[in-house]
Image (cartoon, rainbow, N blue to C red):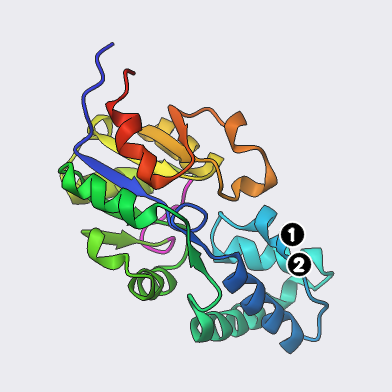
Amino acid sequence: MTTHPPQAAIVDLDGTMVDTIGDFAVALNRMLAELGLPATDRPTIERLVGKGSEHLIRSVLAHVGGRAQLYDAAWSAYQKHYLAINGEHAQLYPGVLEGLAALRAAGLRLVCLTNKPTGFARPLLERKGLAGYFEAVFGGDAFERQKPDPLPLLKACEALGTTPARTLVIGDSSNDAQAARAAGCRVVLVTYGYNHGEPVRNVPADGFVDSLADVPAWLASPA
């Protein structure tokens, strides 16, 4: 089957472009301290991230023995603390800037699609010098459903004016791969992300790269 080259790419944020576990750890532990609950650690957070802030907070509360009824207070505290430090304890992964520049130079239109709330995603992209590469940014609150549901990917394709078959998804987890498969997009996963604590190479995907800078070469290789 002939694979047509992509016209656009939908790029995930946390675990794909930016290592944000440091931000999550600080904001979550400040939230927990405010609620009088014990702290959590980085390995636990790595397993829980990727399904949106609501899922993350509920999961962390359950992990430390907090009552589910604390969710509203926890969400309010988390927003306050996360916005105060957004990007301060996060780092770009190697090759991200080079990869995005190369994809743009190859003529691909780019959208950032993340389960992180849009109000958190936009400032982070700005702070890390990534915002200018993307025509649009869609967070987990942009549509009725989040990844791994295909709806956000289909909506992103609509926004770009491309078809799923001509749109590449770049992510780090089974969420991205499942959504891409259901939407009809090809998907390449980075090998360094979070993927809920599971080996990413076990995820059905079209390919794997060790850096975003490797994506153009992967696209140019025989299918």
Residue 24 locus on image (x, y percent): 61, 70
Q: Was residue 88 drawn as part of the magenta stretch in this picture?
A: no
Please name whichever residue, 85 or 158, is drawn nearer the observer in this view of the structure: 85
The answer to whether mark 2 and mark 1 are in CB contact below 8 A is yes
Q: Residue at x 49, y 78 (%)?
A: 86
Please name whichever residue, 10 or 213, is drawn nearer the observer in this view of the structure: 213
Residue 174 locus on image (x, y percent): 55, 39
Quarter containing the C terminus: top left
Q: Amino acid at mark 2?
A: Asp
- The residue to which callout 1 is attached is 44
**Residue 80 sits in which quadrant?**
bottom right
Residue occupying the far top of the picture:
1
- The residue to which callout 2 is attached is 41
Label the magenta part by its dominant secondary structure: loop
Distance from Cα at disc 2 to Cα at disc 1? 6 Å
Question: Which stretch is magenta?
Answer: 140-147
Category of crowding for the residue at label 2, using alpha-carbon neighbours closer than 10 angstroms: few (below 14), some (14–19), many (at least 20): few
**Residue 117 sits in which quadrant?**
bottom left
**Image mark count:** 2
Please name whichever residue, 79 or 17, is drawn nearer the observer in this view of the structure: 17
